[in-house]
Image (cartoon, rainbow, N blue to C red):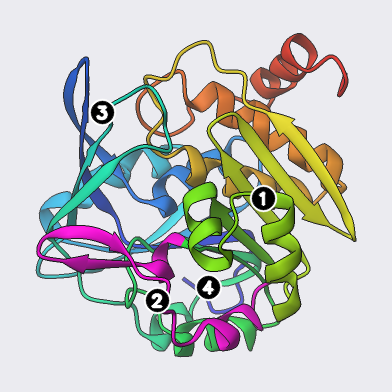
Amino acid sequence: MSNASQYDIAFLGQYTKDTIVTKEGSHIVNGGAYFYGAAAAASMGLKVAALTRLAPEDFPSFRLLLERGVLVRAISTQQSTCLQLLYPSDNPDERMLSVTSVAEPFEPADVGSISAHVWSIGASIRGEVSLAVLEAIKAKGARIGLDAQGFVRVVRDGRLSYDSEWPEKAEVLSLVDVFKADVVEAELLTGTRDLRQAALMLARYGVPEFVLTHGDGVVVYAEGSFFEAPFRPKSLVGRSGRGDTCLASYLAARISMDPEKATFWAAALTSLKMEALGPFSGTRADVESALRERYARYA
């Protein structure tokens, strides 16, 4: 690929092989924020790139992205990141995660051949994406959207745990244009479950926009104002990947929409994604239809 290739949005994150366990049973699915995110952005007709690390035997996992026109740069590693996600109830914010293997972290040189207006950073575990990698992306002049999960989650005794002591928090947030967290992560970082208050507290680090998700919807803080939209899925069978999809669809929508429209777009697309396992498989027309049918205020 030429260094001159310019993409609307690029996704960075390790592939994860996810075993999802719910009351209905268990399924093994291809996962990772990069995977859910790139699929959502591609549905909007954008020029999308994705950069991931995974074991050679898992390369077929991103065939779906290639079929949707996504440029995938896959870096071979000794092993893929493998997670188990246990949902004991119908609350998508209540889950237990364990880890059986972890792929090697990204390096600054990995991002050199992709140029994009916006980068979405979807790490799974602290250490996967370093400050040096983020600095290399920022040096390209790109806007950066970043998910808190890859910086507050650590592996302890095979389990994914949360660690509020984030040593490079100030340095990382100084590079971020859109910061995404769920209600658990927001409380961990600020001490409050009030997402509006959490956004204002985190804004002190210089981050201009926030995408904050909870079980019932998304709260956005941008341009000094709050915007909020509910999730309205008809089922929750595909709830894994909800946050990844929400951030990606918001970032993709913000390329051409104001924050309020992007908030509703993200809520509608994420609602549709939660109705089926795997990444969003619909079209832009499907999202527009959902906006008309489920969001009277937006329509």
Task: Give the Cα distance between marks 4 and 3.
Answer: 40 Å
Coordinates of residue 88 in the picture (x, y in percent): 26, 28
Coordinates of residue 118 in the picture (x, y in percent): 66, 65
- Residue carrying label 4: 114
Q: Secondary structure at mark 1?
A: helix
Answer left or right for 67 relative to 294.
left
- Residue carrying label 2: 129
Earlier residue among tags 3 and 1 = 3
Earlier residue among tags 4 and 3 = 3
| Residue found at x 59% / y 35% | 43
Residue 155 part of the magenta segment: yes
Earlier residue among tags 2 and 4 = 4
Task: Give the Cα distance between marks 2 and 3.
Answer: 30 Å
Task: Give the Cα distance between marks 2 and 4.
Answer: 16 Å
Task: Give the Cα distance between marks 4 and 1.
Answer: 34 Å
Q: Is residue 36 above or below residue 202?
A: above
- Residue carrying label 1: 195
Coordinates of residue 80 in the picture (x, y in percent): 17, 59
Q: For the residue marked with disc 4, what is the amino acid? A: Ile
CB contact under 8 Å: marks 4 and 3: no
Front of the two marks 2 and 4? 2
| Residue found at x 40% / y 44% | 66
